[in-house]
Image: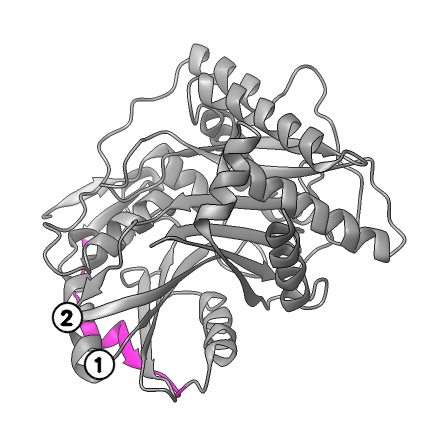
Amino acid sequence: MAGTVRLSPNDLTTLATDHGQVPMNIAAVLVLDGGAAGTAEVIGQRLAAVPRLRQSLRRGGRRRLYWADAAFDIRDHVAAMAPCADEQALLAAAGGLVCQRLPMTRPLWAMRWCEMADGRLAVVLVVHHVLADGMGGLALLAALVDGLGPPPAAPVSQKDPGVRQAARGLRELGVSGRPRLVAPTSITRPTSSRRRVAVARLELAPVVAVAHDHAVTVNDVVIAAVSEVLFDLLDSRGERPPELVVSVPISMRGTGEQLGNQVGAVPVAVPRGLDFGLRVAHIAGRTRAAKAGARGSSSVILGWAFRGLGALRLAQFFVDRQRLVHTFETNLRGPAQLLVIDGRTVEAIVPIAVNPGNVGVSFDVLSYSGRLLISVVADPEQVDAQAVAGSLQEVLAGL
C-alpha cells in the first residue's frame, strides 16, 4: 500500500486507551513441529509482505494520526531469543515480550523465535492492538500459512457514527441512567508492569456437547466457568462480591479478512450463588441480546469516552480506577484443521492480550483443530495465573 491512510475511529480509541503500566499489545505464540532458522526466516518474510506491517504512525496537520510507508528493515523486527526448555519457560518469555513497548517510530510489531529443547520451533509474534483486534489477528495468522492466499487488507473506511448508532451502543453496554459500579475486589487494583501467562487445555467436542445440552454457546460455557473460578478465588480471600462483571467483545464483522479494530464490548454481570445451569442460562440471555442488536455499536460510546479522556489526559486515571468490569474474556474461533507453515505443522497457538489499568486477570480463548485453549493472563502481584488455569481446566473438565 502506497501513500498515507488516516486511522479509523476504533483505532484511535485503541491508542487513547494505551496508558498505564503495560502497553496495548496482543501476541500469538506458535509452536511448530520442527524447523529453526530457515522456517523463522520464512515467517518473517511473510509478515513483512503484509502492507500494513511496513507502515508506521505519523502525525499530520492538526496532529491527526495516519499510517504512512516507513523505512523498513526486517532486522528491526525479527530476531532469535534465548532457547526455552519447555512450555512454561516459553510462556514466561512471551509474557515478558508482550509487556515491552514497541517503538512508535517503526512499524508496530516484533517477532522472536527459538528452538525448544525437544527440537520444536517456538515463535512469539507481538503486535500493537492498533494494528489488529482478535479477528484481525486471525487474518494475520492466515497470511503465514502455506498456500492460503494474499496478505490481509487494511480496514475499509468507516463512516462517522450517528446518534442512532450511539443509542444502540448504550443499549449494548446495558447503560440506562446512572452506570452500575462493580464491587471493588483484590483483582481490580492498579496493576504492575508484569504479566504471567498460563493455559488451560481441553478437547473441544465435550465442551460443545455441554453447550448444546444447555442450548448455549461454547463461549457462554467458558464465561460461566471463568466466573465460578473467580468467585472461588475471591471467596478464599474473604471477599464476597454480589456479582462479577465480565467484559466480552462483540465483533462488528463476521470474518477476519482485514486488520484494524472493529469491535465493541458487552458487560455480562454474573450473580453469585447460581448453579451452573442457571448461571449459563443467565449469561446466554445477555450475550444473545447483544448479538441480536447492531453488533459492536458500543464501540461508538467507548470511542467517544476514551478519546475525550485522552484529550484531557485523564485516560490513565480512569483505567486505573474504573469500576465497570472485573475482568475481560475474549473468544476466537480458530481454524478447524491443523495449519502448516513452511511445511511444518503448527501444533499449538496461544493467544495473549494484555490490558492496562486495574484488571488483574483476563482470559483469551481460542479453538484450534479440535482443541480449546484458554490463556490466563495475570498480574503476578495479584493473581497466580497457573493456579487459575488449573482451576479453570478442572471446572470445565468436570462439566
Residue 343 numbered tag: 2
Give the camera-side residue of 230 and 200: 200
Please state the extent of the stretch shown in magenta in the rendering.
69-83
Q: Position of residue 333 (x, y in %)?
A: 37, 44
Viewer-closest of 5 and 95: 95
As helix, strand or loop, the secondary structure at mark 1 comes to: loop
- Nearer to me, 288 or 395: 395
Q: Position of residue 100 (x, y in %)?
A: 46, 69
**Residue shown at the point (45%, 77%) measured from the top left:** 90
Q: Residue at x 44, y 65 (%)?
A: 101
Q: Position of residue 383 (x, y in %)?
A: 70, 62
Query: For residue 35, which numbered disc appears in the image?
Result: 1
Residue 21 counted in the magenta span: no
Its colouring scheme is one colour
Q: Which of 332/394 is in front?
A: 394
Q: Residue at x 18, y 59 (%)?
A: 145
Residue 305 vertical placement versus 31 (above, below): above
**Comes first in the chain, label 2 or label 1:** 1
Q: Position of residue 136 (x, y in %)?
A: 31, 45
Q: Do tag 2 and tag 1 residues touch (Cβ < 8 Å)? A: yes
Task: Name which residue type carries label 1.
Answer: Gly
Amino acid tagged 2? Gly
**Residue beneath the point at 86% across and 57% down:** 237
Confirm whether the magenta stretch covers residue 82.
Answer: yes
- Which disc, if any, is residue 243? none
Q: Is residue 306 above or below residue 18?
A: above
